[in-house]
Every structure is written in C-alpha cells, then in structure tokens.
Image (spheres, rainbow, N blue to C red):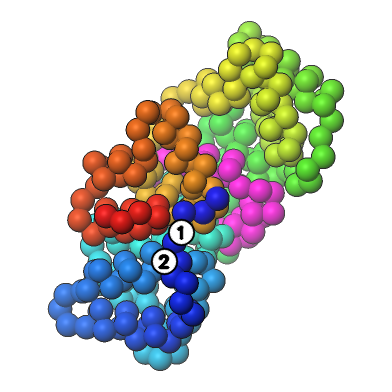
Amino acid sequence: MSTLSIPPTLFSPVDDVSLLHKAFRGLGCDYSMVINILAHRDASQRMSIQQEFTHWYSGDIRTCLTEKLTGNLKIAVLLWILEPATRDAVVLNQALLKDDMRGATEVICSRTPTQIQTFKQIYNSMFGLLEHDLQKHTSGDHKKLLVAYISIQRDEGSEFDIMAAENDAKTLYLAVEKRSGTDKIIKIFSESSNAHLVSVDSIYNRMYGHSLEKVLRKAMKGLRTGDKTLIRVIVTRVEIDMQYIKAEYQKEYKNSLVTAVRLRTVGNYRKFLLALLGTKH
C-alpha cells in the first residue's frame, strides 16, 4: 500500500508548472514549493507536469531541477520524477556501474515478470544489453540468479500447487541448510510465480521455524549495501508497498522508518523523504 499523500483538490498540471517555474526563478530556489508539489503527485501526474512544463516554457524540468537542487535532494527528486520503468532501468544501471549488487538484486528480484520485461527493453535502448552488463558486473551464483530472472517468463497468476510448494520448501532447506547446491535455489526463485513463492515461504516457516528471508540472506551473503539505499528504496516503493515496508521495518528494528529517516537525514532532503513517507517534517 502506498504512503503517497495526494491533495483532494482537482489536479491542475498548468498551475503546478506555473508555481514550479516561479520556484526556479533567480539565483536560488524555493525548495519548499518544489517539495510541496512533486512529493504529492503520483506517477501520471508527474508525467503531466513534465509535459506541460516543456509545452509552456520550452525546456526540460529535469534540467531546471539539476541546476537548482543539490546533494541527496537532487538525486532523490530526479529519480522520483522518472516514469517507474525508466527509473528501474536507471537505478539498475547505476547499481551495476557502482558495484552495488544489493541494489541490482532488489530491482530485478522485486519486480513482476511484466515489469522486468518493460524495464529491460528500456535499459537495452538506453544503456545497451542488460544481460551483457549483468555478465560483466556480476559473478558466480549471483550472476546465474539475476540472468535467469530477466530471461525466464514466470507465471503471474494467483494459482499454486500445494504439493509442489511443499516439495520446493524441502528442496530449499536441503540446498541452504545442508548446502546441497545453489542451482536448485536459483531454479526455484527464478522460475516460480509470486503466488507459489508465498506458499513456499509459509510452508518453509511452518516446517523449519523461519522464513525464506533467512534463506535469501544466506544465499546472498556478502552483498554490499550501496550508499543510496535509502533513496532507492523509498523512491521506488512509495507508490507500491511502502506501508508494508514501514511495518516490517518496525517489526525488525523496534523503531519506525520515519524516525530512522529523521535521524539519518537533514534539511530539504529530509523534508522530501518524509513527505513521500506520508508524514510532515
């Protein structure tokens, strides 16, 4: 569930671009105006704002934002205004170039097959073949998993076979706990539907006392967290499942994600992220 807070008033992209244009005037920038508008518009509204800005002012709003914003605020806002599939392609490219394997894994393994095929096409047109870059920047079992994820068309339906799920839960236990081979892990995760994996997770937890998250942590042991993890996770998940992420964060760390953002960030960057999380600074 999304944490994005959109005003109940009728959306007017013309009014928004007029206010943003005023915010960009002069040597400085009205950061509060930029945040108050962009942090409270959904993906389709942000696309409309970009189109109207170009229509009325013969320029690219991204260029203005690049010139007027600085630091982490600029990074976050420039990612936020991208169309979601394009953003995934950009984030994935940045992750691979910076050796941020956690970021690359997160983008690829948390998207549906349809979403993967969409951002894969965009990636190929913007940066070259995605599979080539994965082959170049990853290695071993991690490479096998990510290449399989972008190559195999998984079922997106809600049906699953309970017996098959039980068999996969047992296979994963032997593969991870007994170290019988990672190829079986890769095959299950890259070829199974989300519905099947949810069932496997439930069965695994019931049979062995912990969830598949522990399995994944073992399988991906050693992956390094990128410096921009906070921006990436919040910006890419706000409109999808940020309420769930906030709840899981609270459960895991006995502290709220909002509090963590307040402690780790400052200034307008903090205001922007908190606005995306649906709270005031």
Report which residue position mark 2 lands on. Answer: 40
| Element marked by disc 1 | loop
Q: Is residue 140 left or right of residue 73?
A: right
As displayed, is residue 219 above or below residue 84? above
Residue lying at the far left of the rendered structure: 27
Q: Are marks 2 and 1 in contact (CB under 8 Å)?
A: yes
Question: Is 226 inside the magenta-drawn segment?
Answer: no
- On the rendered image, what quadrant is the C terminus found in? bottom left
> Crowdedness of circle 1 by 10 Å Cα count: few (<14), some, many (20+)?
many
Q: Residue at x 69, y 13 (%)?
A: 207
> Of 168 and 101, which appears nearest the observer?
168
Q: Residue at x 35, y 54 (%)?
A: 279
> Crowdedness of circle 2 by 10 Å Cα count: few (<14), some, many (20+)?
some
Report which residue position mark 1 lands on. Answer: 4
Which range of residues does the magenta coloring cover? 96-124
Q: Is residue 118 left or right of residue 49?
A: right
